[in-house]
Structure formats: structure tokens, C-alpha cells
Amino acid sequence: MAVTMADVARRAGTSVAVVSYVFNDGPRPVADRTRERVLAAAAELGYRRNRVAAALRSGSSGLVGLVLPDTVNPYFATLGRRLEQELAGAGKLTVIANSGYDADRQAAAIEGFLAAQVDGLIIVSADGAAGAVRAADTPVVYVHHRPRDSAAALIAADNETAVALAVAHLREHGHGRIDFLAGPGDDGPVATRTAAWRAAATGELLRCAYTRDAAARLIARLAAESRLPRALVVATDEQAVGVLAAAGAAGVDLPGALALVSCDGSPDAAFTVPSLTAVEQPFGELARRAVRRLLGEAIPDDPVRAHLVPRRSCGCASPPFAR
């Protein structure tokens, strides 16, 4: 049979009410010595708090639903990990769903979370996964991208500054013409990055899907046609990894014949060959603001700024790894 609060109370020599106060953080305070005795008794008996029962009593499940477009993509995986850490610090348990860049899957995940009575929703919505969430009683925060028909809060990076930093850095290396690799369409943050590139640089706009494979096939074709860019800003790290792989396979000198800067800055960028120069998005601050906003706290209005991390792919010296 499952261990109950009554069992813990008997072992600790206290009341069921006191055990409840310990595991539900109130509503009444518990002396430190008594709290330690209750926790020790719970550990000895293998007691686990019944989250469902607690939710029925308090009206709060303690759960937050997090929807990610792709849990394997380094950018979204890093952002998801930071969001989960922030939510854990706020006493919330994160339940994650993968939408696979599909609007129907995203909608189904959101409906499932709402049916489970989550305390809030954080939606990292990718391009194409549109449709506002109808959840009058559940706080909703979007990160990265928000559907056009939604009035929910959006926590987004400063994509214009990211691209401006990338273009300016390549110009410092002596490049006049700077091409840009975008996604298959103009929507969401990458559309903003594309517009920022158009305002800052002269070059060719290239397009492919947001995958390593699609970017690799594009670069392989351009290399075979002797049409490779001399300098390239890439919208996402996922595409940039494909560019590096295909260029390396074609014997292209990186960065001698192709200088490259990406606009995500996920941790994988430091471990490519050559290491990838990237405008690193402030994942921690994005996550912190998103969780604070979800919990109803005030957050700054200024954009969350990225910063450039120079490495080998643009022609800078790559810093040595720490020993």
C-alpha cells in the first residue's frame, strides 16, 4: 500500500496537519527541527507527495507546460533546458512536448496541457506553428515567436542587433559583399533577421529548410557550380552546421574561401570544425524573463541583447579550451 501522510506523521511523532504544512509550504510555518524530523521520516518510509491530491486541495497543479518545436535542435534544446531550470527554481515542474514544427501537433499539445490543469504555458513557437491559444484562466507566454493573432506576452531576442553584429564583424575582416542564408519563407524571427540583413548588407539571399541536411545539400550544389559565397551570415546554427559539413567535404578552405557567422550561438558552436563564430543569444536571460512574466512579475521592456563570440569560421583565432 502507498505510504500516506498519516504514516509519516506517526513516524515523526507529529500531526498530519504539520506534515501537510511541510510538504505544501504552509499555510502555517513549521519549526526547523520539526521540519527536519518530518522529512527524515518521509525519506525512511519512501513517502512521495501526491501532486494530484495537492492540486485538488490548492487549485494549483505545480505543473507548467513547455512546448518546443524540436527538442533535438541545439538552439531549442538549450532554451528549453534554461526554461526548465528557471521553472524548477520557482518551484514548478516542467512537462515538455515536442511540436515538430507542426501547427496541429502544437495545438494538440497545448490542449493536452490545458486539460491537465497546468499552472501556465510557455510556448516556443516556430515559424508556421500559428494559432493563438484560447486559455482565459491560464497564463501564457511565448518565447522566440508569437502567432500574429495572439495578444499573449512575447519574450524575444533582439534579432536586428544580432544580424548587425554579424555583418559588422565580417566587414572588419574586409568583406564587402555578404550573403545571407534564411529559411524557406518569411515568418517569425528569421524574417526579422532577413530584413535586418537587407538593411545592413549587399549580397544574395539564399534559402533552405532549417535543417543540417538541407543546408549541406545547398552548399554542395553551390560548390559544384563554383557559386559559393565569400562571406555568409546564417540564420540558425542548425543550418550553419550543415554549411560547415558540406564545405569541408568539398575541400573548401574555411575561412579562407568562405567566412561564416551564425545567429544562434548554441553550445554546439564551439565544437564544430572549424569552430563556429556566432552571435550568441542570451538563453539564460530569455528564460528568466519568460518565467517571471508567467508568474505575473514585471520584466524590463528593453530587448534581450545578443553578443558576438568570435571563433575560427570567420577568420578569428579560436580561444583554447579550458583545462
Image (cartoon, rainbow, N blue to C red):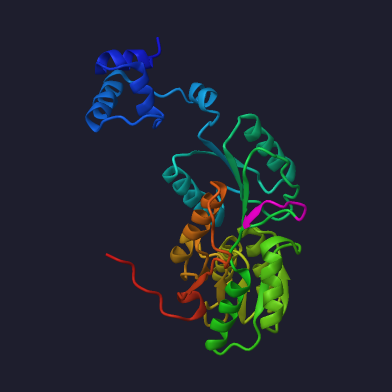
Name the image quarter holding residue 18. Answer: top left
Where is 198 relative to 114, above or below? below
Q: What stretch is highlighted in magenta?
A: 148-154
Count of labels shown?
A: 0
Is any part of residue 251 visible from this angle?
no
Instruction: Look at the image and tell me in which quarter the C terminus lies.
Output: bottom left
Per the image, is 149 magenta? yes
Instruction: Look at the image and tell me in which quarter the N terminus lies.
Output: top left
Where is 22 relative to 220, above or below? above
- Rendered location of residue 45, percent (x, y): 30, 18
- Rendered location of residue 311, percent (x, y): 45, 74
- Rendered location of residue 47, percent (x, y): 35, 21
Where is 30 relative to 136, above or below? above
User: Which residue occupies the extreme front position in the image?
Assistant: 28
User: Which residue occupies the extreme top position in the image?
Assistant: 1
Query: Residue at coordinates 50% horizontally, 21% vertically from top-left?
Result: 53
Left or right of 172 in this view: 40: left
Left or right of 272 in this view: 68: right
- Rendered location of residue 32, percent (x, y): 25, 32
Closer to the camera, 287 or 173? Answer: 287
Query: Residue at coordinates 53% horizontally, 88% vertically from top-left?
Result: 172
Left or right of 150 in this view: 18: left
User: Which residue occupies the extreme left position in the image?
Assistant: 33
Closer to the camera, 319 or 53? Answer: 53
Is any part of residue 154 visible from this angle?
yes
**Magenta stretch mostly in which secondary structure?**
loop
Per the image, is 85 magenta? no
Closer to the camera, 73 or 120? Answer: 120
Name the image quarter holding residue 302. Answer: bottom right
